[in-house]
Image (tube, grey):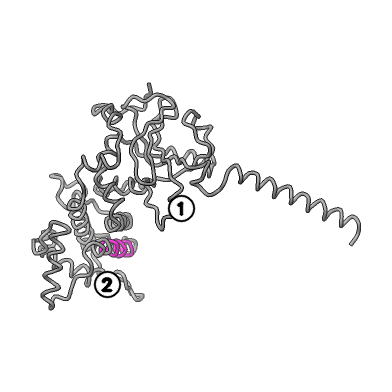
Amino acid sequence: MSKDDNKLREHITKYLNAVQKEREKFFQKYPPDPPNEVCFYACLSGLKVENSFGPSVHDFAEFFETEFEKIYIWTSTKDKNSWIVSQVKKDVKGLPFWKTVGHILHLAQYFYDAFEISIDIEIKYHWMYYFSPEQAFDEILLYEDSDFIRMDMETASIVKATKIEAFAPLIELLLRDDICYTALSQMLSSFELHYCCLICELGLSPIMKHESHEPEIWQHGYYISKMEAGIVQACRCVEGILGEPPNRAKQNSLLKHKEKWKRLLGINPDELYDKVNMSYLDFYYSLFFELRNPSAHSYGNIHYELERKRAIEAQCFAAIVLRGYIETNMKSHDEATRFLKFNRELLARVSDTISTSVTD
């Protein structure tokens, strides 16, 4: 090897060592594993709070808290709606699974809005290094940052702080109960895969605004896989709560299963599910064996005989079961808000009559 080759090798080695040292120095200052000592606040995008409670710029108000997160409302910018910020304990890294407040708010919002899915906005965690509420939003150092990300963060549903507080019983139940968390996640997935208007289908409104219809012959192929997936997820929602329907020939098992309905849902399974003119229990057998099985196991066949009304019947049934489970197992509103330590002083300042982005 020539002297020139050796010099080139030395220069390359020095350069790579310098790059490595700079990289190590950078990651010492900005460790890439939040939450950590310098990056334990996350700005939640997808949901913002309107300012009728009268905040000033740089206000950083306690809102509520869970075991692993303390939630604040941060007013970062003059005359702009406020952010939701989570202060996260590093202990979450040791959990087998972390139920984030962001995802729980996402689930609760869709449940209370009857799964009305127009624009599905995910509530994302944007980690902030060396966060101080005295900074302007443009000065915040984000773990993942770009002009596109900052622009995307501004896309959000705008709600009153009191609306989030109204979710308190469900927030507490989702944190406490894995069955509810899983079932509600599957129910939302079902509606994302195949949408129908639950309010209209269950007669929750005197006016039928969104009448369902079967797809036209040229639309059928587009709908089949969505209907199948919606049915499977709806059935999984119910199965997670009630278990597999028992052998009807075994009377003791059947009686225990019926008692489970009453205990967990407050529903008599022999009552009429009037959307299909059969009992709730009879429909569960039909859902499990006649609808779920062919939807989950196609064996390469086109499920062309599947009607959209059957998918809607399955989703409405699952929604009724889920609602029964939630209402039966939730704590009272007062008990849930005390447990979550909601800031009552802030909530008392929220206006019922106006919504505004204006700051004091």
On screen, residue 225 above or below 77: below
Please identify the dominant SS of the magenta region: helix
The magenta stretch is 224-235
Q: Are marks 2 and 1 in contact (CB under 8 Å)?
A: no
Q: Is residue 231 magenta?
A: yes
Q: Residue at x 57, y 46 (%)?
A: 31
Residue 105 falls in which quadrant of the image? top left
Whole-percent x and y of residue 209?
20, 46
Q: Residue furthest bottom?
A: 249
Residue picked out by circle 1:
93
Front-most of residues 318 and 102 = 102
Q: Residues within 10 Å of mark 2 (few under 14, many from 20)?
A: some
Sequence-wise, the earlier of marks 2 and 1 is 1
Q: Residue at x 26, y 69 (%)?
A: 292
Residue picked out by circle 2:
293
Front-most of residues 104 and 36 = 36
From the viewer's perspective, tell me whether residue 40 is left or right of residue 336. right
From the viewer's perspective, tell me whether residue 123 is left or right of residue 224. right
On screen, residue 313 above or below 172: below
Residue 349 falls in which quadrant of the image? top left
From the viewer's perspective, tell me whether residue 154 is left or right of residue 311. right
Name which residue type carries label 2: Asn
